[in-house]
Amino acid sequence: MENIMKKILTLLTIFTSLISFEVGANLTSPSLNSSSMSSVVVQRALASGVTFTTRQVEYQLVLGARAILKSDNSVAARSANSSSNNLWSDENEHFLLSIGAGGQSANSSLRASGVKFNQIAYSPNNGNVAILSGYIIVKIRPSYSAEAIAATYKINLVENFKDISYAWYRVNSGQDIFAITQNLSGHAGTESAEVELIENVTPR
């Protein structure tokens, strides 16, 4: 029930964002806000070559960056969060964010050790860093079904709010969330598709 409420709140935020965008209002971004973002973050964002847009804001995937839940007390997670193993780090209430000195190979080792983490993106428009939830939010057109779209792209339908024509999807291991989001955006059965960013993330 809690997860459903979070998704409903996300939808309400999307609608508010769209209205505010039309009247030129500035909304609080669902991201870490740093007035002096590390040059390492910017460099790794440029190096990734992956760009996407969420709520009219452009983001770049930060290569080798990860957000690990503070509640993960495993040896591998503690090692990954050690400042001596990172090129950059930050934190908020729930996550420890970092770019490991070992880059992508270090993240692969983390996965192999069973550590779950979220990807991080940087916005050159506002200098913010956002945490990706791992979900894709899709607005479904009338006469199309969320289930059929999931079957087409071989992705997982997590939530389907038929009354408001929105669906949440999660990709499978090995699938590219950005490529699939782009493909979903061009599908005849969708009005929009965006990578979801985690809400209410406040920097320390």
Image (tube, rainbow, N blue to C red):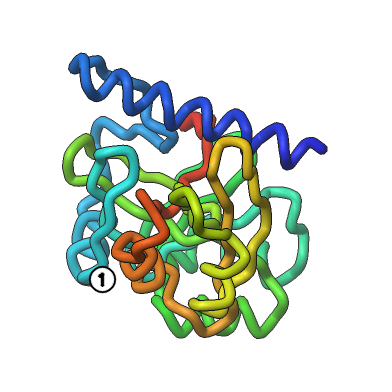
Residue 29 rendering spot, x and y as whole percentages: 37, 30
Q: Secondary structure at mark 1?
A: helix
Residue 172 seen from this side:
yes
* Residue at point 23%, 47% (across, down): 58
Badge 1 crowding class, 10 Å Cα cut-off, few under 14, some 14 to 19, many 20 or more, is few
Residue 79 seen from this side:
no
Q: Is residue 50 left or right of residue 1?
A: left
Q: Which residue is mark 1?
A: 48
Please identify the residue farthest to the front as the structure is shown.
143
Q: Is residue 112 left or right of residue 144?
A: right
Which amino acid, mark 1? Ser
* Residue at point 34%, 63% (across, down): 188
Q: Is residue 126 left or right of residue 20?
A: left
Residue 83 rendering spot, x and y as whole percentages: 50, 58
Please identify the residue farthest to the right as the structure is shown.
1
Q: Is residue 83 left or right of residue 93?
A: left
Which image quadrant: the N terminus?
top right
With respect to residue 75, does 24 lie above or below?
A: above
Residue 40 rendering spot, x and y as whole percentages: 25, 58
* Residue at point 59%, 29% (across, down): 9
Residue 43 rendering spot, x and y as whole percentages: 19, 62
* Residue at point 42%, 54% (across, down): 195
Quarter holding residue 30: top left
With respect to residue 7, does 73 lie above or below?
A: below
